[in-house]
Image: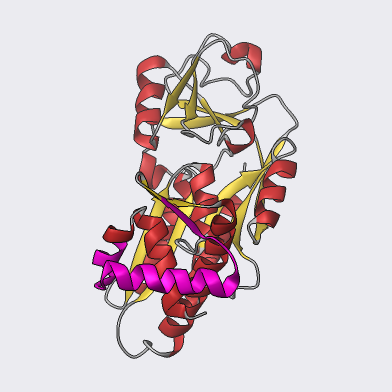
Amino acid sequence: MTLQQLRYAIAIADNHSMNKAAGELFISQPSLSGAIKELEEEINLTIFTRSNRGIKTTVEGEEFLGYARQIIGNYELLEDRFVNKASGKKKFAVSMQHYTFAVQAFIQMVKHFGMNEYEFAVRETKTYEIIQDVKHLKSELGILYLNDFNEKALTKIFHENELEFVELMNCRIYAYIWKKHPLAGKKSVSFTDLMEYPCLSFEQGNNNAFYFAEEVFSTLDYKQIIKANDRATVLNLMVGLNGYTLCSGIICEDLNGDDYTAVPLENKDTMRIGYIKRKNVMLSELAKIYIKELEKFKDSVL
């Protein structure tokens, strides 16, 4: 088994096509097919099934590719750290739920290093995709939360995918609303207070199990609920419809402006915000600096 064979298998899985993968890899289709056949024979495993409809990855193949992506990802990290350190850009990517403070920490890290020697990527995305990004080393870190409801399910998923969760802060739950919202002046709000206003939730796509929800109390039967895909739309809905979302209470006026406020929810539940990373993979210096920027928001927890 070689690194080249692993790269070939990953390219086929990513393209869902032997021909497309061959074109991407600049080799002939017969050569690629032969290399994969040799790999499957060596490991005594069928990675792909072939039919008139194209290439499909088997269940065992998905597991194999998970390990293959980890090996290739670790090799690239090793190569970047020790082979390409004198030339080329160092890379850092993070995937996150829709947290403004996580974006603000990213901005501060980029300002610290500048863009001349580094290549950065930040992805605000769905919970499932955060997990997949870190699993496949597309992102070094994933920012999300655990609470009493989702912890058991997500911890099991982390374990199955060779991931670990590191807690950064434990936050009360707040209703995040427009400053001109009828409830903005209250010292605290209850679910009864919020009942007449639309709850705003981030869409989770096909992987919409309750434990993937970005908002706590996802199983409640809300009278009104609106799902959106991005943070800007949620903010617009807060203003246009007096909507609200449930959050950590950490406000970044530098990015969102001063038109919004967080009102404590009359509930004892908390959300534990942290990051996930691959087990047994050392953090890069960029990741360590980013985590330090995140930790600065501990003092902002209301």
Q: How is the image coloured?
A: secondary structure
Q: List x then y, in percent, for residue 35.
A: 41, 74
Image height of 212 relative to 239, above or below = below
Residue nearest the observer in this picture, 155 or 23: 23
Q: List x then y, in percent, for residue 16.
A: 37, 52
Left or right of 173 in this view: 7? left
Range shown magenta: 21-50
Residue nearest the observer in this picture, 221 or 57: 57
Q: Considering the whole magenta stretch, tell me its main secondary structure.
A: helix
Image height of 121 relative to 202, above or below = below
Q: List x then y, in percent, for residue 3.
A: 46, 79
Left or right of 205 in this view: 246? right
Q: How many marks?
A: 0
Q: List x then y, in percent, for residue 128.
A: 53, 44
Does the segment drawn in magenta span residue 44? yes
Left or right of 244 in this view: 174? right
Query: Is any atom of residue 107 visible in this view?
Result: no
Residue at point 38%, 36% (across, down): 230
Residue at point 41%, 23% (across, down): 238
Q: Quadrant of the C terminus?
A: top right
Image height of 160 relative to 279, above or below = above
Figure quadrant of residue 256: top left
Image height of 101 relative to 37, above or below = above
Figure quadrant of residue 7: bottom left
Query: Is any atom of residue 147 visible in this view?
Result: yes
Does the segment drawn in magenta span residue 292? no
